[in-house]
Image (cartoon, rainbow, N blue to C red):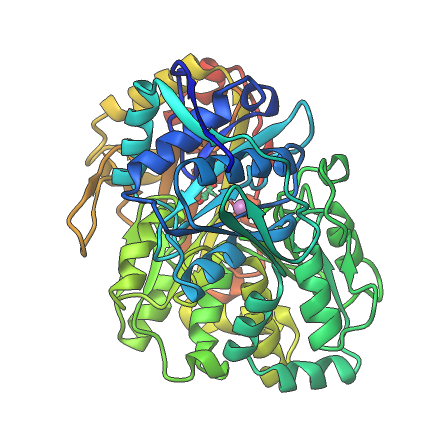
């Protein structure tokens, strides 16, 4: 019988989960006790774990395997009966949500810093998902943080490491470690939602696609589903081997970082369809031939075409989008006669709406789309939904989006990120904006309808979240929004979101940077971005 050790420890500062879990440099996580304290704080904040089952896995980044061994021993030390861990320590975020729900586990721990780079000098992350499958709501993350501040000891067993590559049940000091295939349950769920026969026929007819897994977690999933079940030619999946440092890349599926894919789609004789996913598999970018679909438009187009997919044939109960996401989805909801909810940034805010059956599809401007099939955003799911729509409509991606704009009007949209700026300058800028009273004033050619700091009251459980982003909304419905990122690990990242509705089809072809030029300049001026941050240009534009 292996003895459970109780190890004395001292609290670390700053174990406060951000938009999606605790993200820090690997070196921070490698400090003795750092990971252990946070895991113990989780186990003590989620109720009685004795005899329960936990799901566990991560995006395969550096430190993933080591962290899993530690968490397994701590789960045994804290009385869990079983831990289901993805083979090789691999489990995409949406697959984790799928497994938690399917096997009714007592939630799960996901190891990922998502789109942040990986490697010994880069980032690591950890988050707890609740038994419903979604990210822990704020009440739970606050409890974990509070516990991390007064922790004095953690519990762990002394035992040999588990062979994470060998499928099946392993014994760890009396606890069962079940190493399972991380792809199978997820692939089966996808097949239950989409018309795989129609997509197979599409590929058989010569439809060309590239999927960029960015050397991150979706490689095995995409190969099994696209090249396996759906018969897409070998080589459809690019960068399909998960690597601990993502091949020195930045696994963020946008026009800047998914450059291999962008090059392929904008080349002469490029494929018909392109997609990419992020580090942990919950984000997606959609490209057509010579065409980029903004995430906000992608949500709206999928909502408008959802009934073409078997899993959504009965229609949608409602749509939910994060506040900075464009109102393109709202127009579809209005046309369908269903509600559209506006939540703060972060998938955790969609959970109650999905659980209550109020929303079926959800989306964020940050390349996140998903539905009530799990409680996370889901990159490959969005790609498969697009494929299902393309298989039925038999039109190029660009035509589908342009027709959509012609019918609903176009919410011209862009996000400008200023990464790695000084934290106090960033906070000063936000405080300054918060203090402005602009109502009724003119900014350039625009007149301000209202400005505020977005606050949200959850319509299901009544919980209130404040300070979720500064909005300046103009009388014509255009708006600029300012937020600080809650997922970075170095300095601060200022995100500026710019949106304008354009009903005139003759203007729809314009590059958003051109169409939005006045609003972009106005946003820069009103927030004094250059004076306060020293930056004249954003780091990333999406
Ligand atoms: C970003 C995105 C947000 C997303 C979050 C987690 O947060 O803006 O929409 O939910 O990342 O996604 P922030 O606070 O940096 O703006 V992931 O794929 O990093 O788990
Ligand atoms: Co992610």
Q: Is residue 32 above or below residue 276?
A: above
Q: Is residue 482 left or right of residue 269?
A: left
Which of 10/500 is in front?
10
* Residue at figure coordinates x 60%, y 20% from the top left: 27
**Residue 348: x percent and y percent?**
35, 48
Q: Is residue 137 left or right of residue 86?
A: left
Q: Is residue 365 left or right of residue 185?
A: left
Query: To which quarter of the image does residue 65 belong?
Result: top right
Query: How many numbered marks does the figure carry?
Result: 0
**Residue 520: x percent and y percent?**
47, 36
* Residue at figure coordinates x 59%, y 40% from the top left: 115
Q: Is residue 359 above or below residue 202?
A: above
* Residue with the most extreme front position: 1
* Residue at figure coordinates x 55%, y 40% from the top left: 112
* Residue with the most extreme left position: 462
Query: To which quarter of the image does residue 155 belong?
Result: top left
Residue 167 visible (yes or no): yes
**Residue 124: x percent and y percent?**
57, 31
């Amino acid at each position: 019988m292996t003895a459970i050790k109780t190890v004395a420890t001292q609290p670390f500062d700053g174990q406060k989960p951000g938009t999606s879990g605790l993200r820090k440099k690997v070196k921070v996580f490698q400090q003795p006790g750092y990971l252990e304290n946070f895991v113990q704080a989780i186990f003590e904040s989620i109720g009685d774990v004795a005899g329960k089952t936990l799901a566990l896995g991560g995006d395969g980044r550096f430190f993933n395997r080591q962290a899993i061994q530690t968490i397994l021993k701590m789960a045994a030390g804290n009385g869990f009966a079983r831990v289901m861990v993805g083979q090789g320590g691999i489990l995409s975020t949406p697959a984790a949500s799928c497994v938690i729900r399917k096997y009714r586990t007592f939630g799960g721990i996901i190891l990922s810093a998502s789109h942040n780079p990986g490697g010994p000098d880069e980032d690591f992350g950890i988050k707890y998902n609740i038994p419903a499958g979604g990210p822990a709501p704020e009440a739970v993350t606050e409890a974990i943080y509070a516990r991390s501040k007064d922790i004095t000891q953690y519990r762990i067993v002394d035992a040999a490491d588990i062979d994470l590559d060998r499928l099946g049940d392993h014994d760890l000091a009396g606890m069962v470690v079940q190493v399972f295939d991380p792809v199978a349950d997820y692939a089966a769920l996808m097949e239950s939602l989409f018309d795989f026969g129609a997509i197979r026929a599409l590929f058989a007819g010569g439809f060309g696609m590239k999927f960029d897994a960015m050397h991150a977690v979706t490689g095995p999933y995409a190969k099994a589903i696209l090249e396996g079940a759906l018969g897409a030619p070998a080589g459809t999946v690019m960068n399909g081997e998960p690597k601990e440092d993502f091949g020195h890349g930045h696994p963020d599926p946008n026009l800047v970082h998914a450059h291999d894919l962008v090059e392929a789609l904008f080349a002469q004789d490029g494929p018909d369809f392109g997609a990419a996913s992020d580090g942990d598999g919950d984000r997606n970018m959609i490209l057509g031939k010579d065409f980029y679909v903004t995430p906000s438009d992608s949500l709206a187009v999928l909502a408008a075409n959802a009934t073409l997919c078997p899993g959504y044939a009965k229609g949608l109960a409602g749509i939910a989008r994060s506040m900075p996401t464009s109102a393109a989805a709202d127009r579809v909801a209005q046309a369908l006669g269903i509600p559209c909810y506006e939540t703060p940034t972060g998938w955790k805010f969609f959970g109650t709406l999905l659980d209550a059956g109020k929303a079926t599809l959800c989306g964020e401007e940050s390349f996140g789309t998903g539905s009530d099939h799990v409680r996370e955003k889901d990159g490959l799911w969005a790609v498969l939904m697009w494929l299902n729509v393309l298989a039925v409509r038999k039109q190029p991606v660009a035509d589908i989006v342009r027709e959509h704009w012609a019918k609903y009007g176009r919410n011209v949209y862009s996000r400008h990120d200023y990464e790695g700026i000084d934290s106090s300058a960033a906070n000063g800028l936000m405080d300054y904006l918060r203090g402005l009273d602009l109502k009724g004033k003119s900014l350039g050619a625009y007149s301000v309808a209202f400005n505020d700091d977005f606050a949200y009251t959850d319509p299901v459980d009544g919980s209130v979240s404040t300070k979720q982003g500064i909005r300046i909304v103009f009388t014509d419905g255009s708006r600029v929004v300012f937020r600080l990122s809650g997922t970075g690990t170095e300095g601060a990242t200022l995100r500026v979101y710019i949106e304008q509705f354009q009903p005139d089809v003759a203007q729809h072809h314009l590059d958003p940077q051109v169409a939005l030029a006045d609003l972009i300049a106005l946003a820069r001026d009103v927030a004094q971005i250059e004076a306060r941050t020293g930056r004249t240009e954003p780091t990333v534009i999406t």
